[in-house]
Image: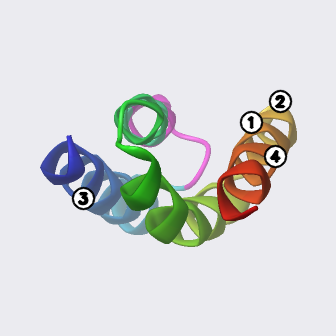
């Protein structure tokens, strides 16, 4: 799943540059990255969480902040 996270993150960043942060392809790729991250083992999720948060914060999609909060919460729990 780590490969999937990296792949979908790369695709989301590329679509952001080419199509914009609100394009449906960008949002779909970012959503796939989140889905892959949620399936990572705890240690991988902890280490890759900040990069995923940064990616999502670069997008301007409705509701993205609730996803960012959920990721931050999981990272915080994994770090303790």
Give how far apart the Cα atoms at labels 4 and 3 are.
21 Å
Q: Are marks 2 and 1 in contact (CB under 8 Å)?
A: yes
Residue 74 falls inside the magenta stretch: no
* Residue matched to label 4: 73
Give how far apart the Cα atoms at labels 2 and 1 are.
7 Å
Query: On screen, 20 above or below 39?
Result: below
Q: Are marks 3 and 1 in contact (CB under 8 Å)?
A: no
Give how far apart the Cα atoms at labels 4 and 2 are.
16 Å
Tell which tag, 2 or 1, sits nearer the viewer: 1
* Residue matched to label 2: 63
Residue under the image location 61 percent in, 43 percent down: 22
Tell which tag, 1 or 4, sits nearer the viewer: 4
Quick check: 61 left or right of 2?
Answer: right
How far from the left and from the top, in percent, is residue 69?
A: 85, 45
Q: Earlier in the sequence, mark 4 or mark 3?
A: 3
Label 1 secondary element: helix
Majority SS type along the magenta span = helix
Label 2 CA crowd tier, 10 Å (few <14, some 14–19, many 20+): few
Looking at the rendering, the stretch of residues picked out in magenta corresponds to 21-28
How far from the left and from the top, in percent, is residue 18?
A: 35, 62
How far from the left and from the top, in percent, is residue 74?
A: 71, 44
Residue 27 falls inside the magenta stretch: yes
Give how far apart the Cα atoms at labels 3 and 1 are.
18 Å
Q: Earlier in the sequence, mark 1 or mark 4?
A: 1
């Amino acid at each position: 799943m780590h490969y999937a996270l990296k792949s979908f993150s790369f695709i989301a960043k590329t679509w952001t540059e080419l199509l914009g942060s609100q394009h449906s392809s960008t949002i779909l790729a970012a959503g796939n990255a989140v889905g892959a991250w949620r399936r990572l083992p705890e240690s991988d999720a902890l280490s890759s969480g900040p990069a995923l948060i940064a990616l999502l914060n670069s997008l301007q999609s409705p509701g993205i902040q609730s996803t960012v909060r959920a990721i931050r919460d999981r990272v915080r729990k994994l770090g303790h």
